[in-house]
Amino acid sequence: MLIDNNKVITINYTLKNDDGNLIDESNDGSFCYLHGADNIIPGMEQALHGKTKDDQLQLSLKPDEAYGEYVEALTQIVDRAMFDVNDTIEAGMQFQAQSENGQMIMITVTSVDGDNVTIDGNHPLAGETLHYDITVVDVRDATEEEISHGHVHMPGHEHDH
Ligand code: ZN
């Protein structure tokens, strides 16, 4: 079965940056996604299209094929009072926020100076060229429910909609 839209693809991969440092990996068959639904970065989805089980790929993806260029304007300093008073705010924390156009984005706290909290709306891998080693582990048809939800339903993972 070839990788095409509305298939559920399981891959093992390692991700390294330009310096050759390991950033992320999945090697136990636990990473899967719905093809054609923007679940993964565009460069990887394009490269996997038409591939099949046991195929191996090596990809080097520029920022525009991965997590985008780093945009300085997405950093800002906000007041400590913006956050829940009970939370400890420290550099490296991440949380979800809604952007002006309604998209959910991941915000990272990059520094804390008294009541001044610097936040960064860039993806942590924005601006990076990414190097992937990928093995296709499995390709199956998505269920109608998965297609209508736009994501994979993992057995044993309950989720609310
Ligand atoms: Zn769902």
Image (cartoon, rainbow, N blue to C red):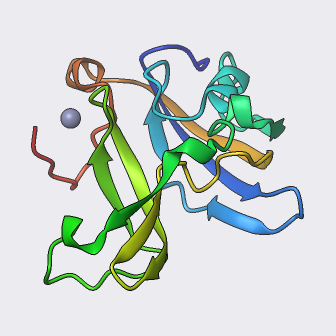
Picture quarter with ligand 1: top left
- Residue situated furthest left in the rendering: 160
Residue at image point 71% right, 44% down: 135
Task: Name the side, left or right, on which 124 lies relative to 54.
Answer: left
Image x and y of residue 158, in percent: 15, 52
Residue at image point 27% right, 23% down: 143
Q: Compared with residue 146, is residue 127 higher up or lower down, i.e. above or below? A: below
Q: Compared with residue 157, is residue 88 higher up or lower down, i.e. above or below? A: below
Q: Compared with residue 75, is residue 49 higher up or lower down, i.e. above or below? A: above
Residue 153 location, quadrant: top left
Foreground residue, 56 or 110? 110
Task: Name the side, left or right, on which 56 lies relative to 99.
Answer: right
Q: Compared with residue 65, is residue 117 higher up or lower down, i.e. above or below? A: below
Image x and y of residue 120, in percent: 49, 56
Image x and y of residue 2, in percent: 61, 17
Foreground residue, 111 or 139? 111
